[in-house]
Image (spheres, helix red, strand yellow):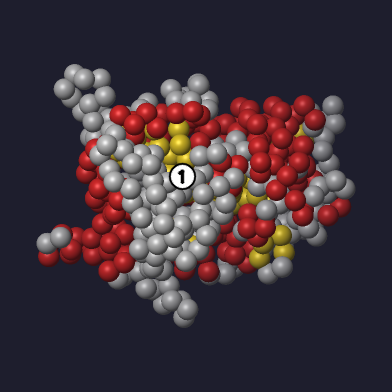
Amino acid sequence: MTAGTKRRPKRLLAVAGAAALSLIALTACTGTGSSDKPAAVDGGGIGTAKKHVKITMMSNDAFAQQWQDQLVPEFNKEFPYIDVTIDAVPYTELLAKGLLNGTDPDPQYDLITLDDPWTPQLANAGVLMDLKNDAKQWTDKGYDWADFNAAPLASSEWDGKQYGVPLRSNMLLMFYNKALYAKAGLAEPTPELTWDQYLKEAPSLVQDTDGDGKVDSWAVGLTWMRGVLSPPVWQAVLNSNGGALFDKDMKPTFDTKAGIAALQTQVDLLKYAPPGATNYNYTEPLDAFRQGKVASIFTWGSAYKSAAVDPAVTTLTPDQVGIQTMPAGSDGASTHRGIWSGSVFKNSAHPEAAWTFLQWMTSKKGEVWTTNTLGRSSRRSRARTTWRTRVRCGGPAARSRTRSRRSSPTRRVRPSKDRRPRRTRSRRPPIRSMNC
């Protein structure tokens, strides 16, 4: 890399760093003007045939419409007198809008979908109900708190109080098109794949698949424009190379060679992406993968259903799509978690109905439907029936926002005509293939 190319990533990294620090500061600060208005003593009830109860949830626009069209009608089969509206709100507006709603004497919303970094600020602002205490009187006796996986449940806990329940539990994974890898003469990715090896293979995945002399398939789809998925991918690469956002004293440590290298990885990947990929946010690379235009994408695991299962939106089938951990760096494997929780506003006029809706969504019975239909679960009892089975069946994957050493003292990958077996040295037992 020339001196000129070094300076550009440095400037980009400075911008990314400033944005990260702003987010941390926003998350850490304590709010003021919290609402002291208690919830309705009787909770507002759950409606009757003559008088329905109406509740509104502000939700990330990525899945709000899907919930409104599919999940709410299913909920109403059991609770027909609770009318639920899911209002789609852009991710960048949710936190601020939630704070305003929570301090409004006449709030528009009863519930919010909560990204885990926001829990401290909203909790300290006093706008959310403590579900284990404030909503205890409306909690079904069969509601099993202990069945939740620990990390998703803890994401909405603060100072010993439970302000939410997990609705979507995610981590970054690699999806790949098996046919495109085979056509390029490459072995399918394994847990031992590194970022350096991926970049060496990428040129072979830019190919003409129909023989008309024109390239019609590329190596990778990713969020390159400024969006919510770009920083997590950058941080996953950073961590995999031994970098970190902060040191033990919470001083920034990402303006380093490791930080620049992580950003450069994203820049280098763009060389092997379809034309116009600089405008890719979250949906565009997923669409390209569904249509067979890219051989691999790095995205949230919850996208597996729409990428490989649902014929209404994808041309691919489960047999054609492989799932793998993110490529490793010099320090091992790394990924990034993403957890959405559901919370009830303390100033809601109908907290009982709002909590009833969240209980149904996250109960064992409700998750049978949501897992089978939407393909995600945060409960231990449902883990073996979701896309995450394909991750877990191979052993422990890279933990959320942590690093683990790559495995296998000497692991051979099936050779292809264009590649020799590669070796990986490590001191830990193997992470088995996730294609099980």
Q: Amino acid at mark 1?
A: Gln
Q: Quadrant of residue 182?
A: top left
Image quarter of the N terminus: bottom left
Residue 346 vertical position relative to residue 207 in the rendered view, above or below: below
185 or 257, nearer to the observer: 185
Residue 280 horizontal side relative to residue 118, left or right: left
Where does the image place residue 381, in percent across and percent down from the top left? 73, 44
Res. 24 in view: yes
Which residue is at a point 66% across and 65% down the rendered structure image?
Answer: 158
- Residue placed at 75% from the left, 51% from the top? 147
Image-based side of 407 in relation to 186, left or right = right
Q: Tell me the SS state at disc 1.
A: strand
Residue named by callout 1: 324
Specify the quadrant of the image occupied by residue 161: bottom right
Question: Where, quadrant-wise, is the C terminus in this rendering?
Answer: top right
- Is there any visible trace of residue 58 in the rendered image? no
Q: Is residue 349 above or below residue 315?
A: below
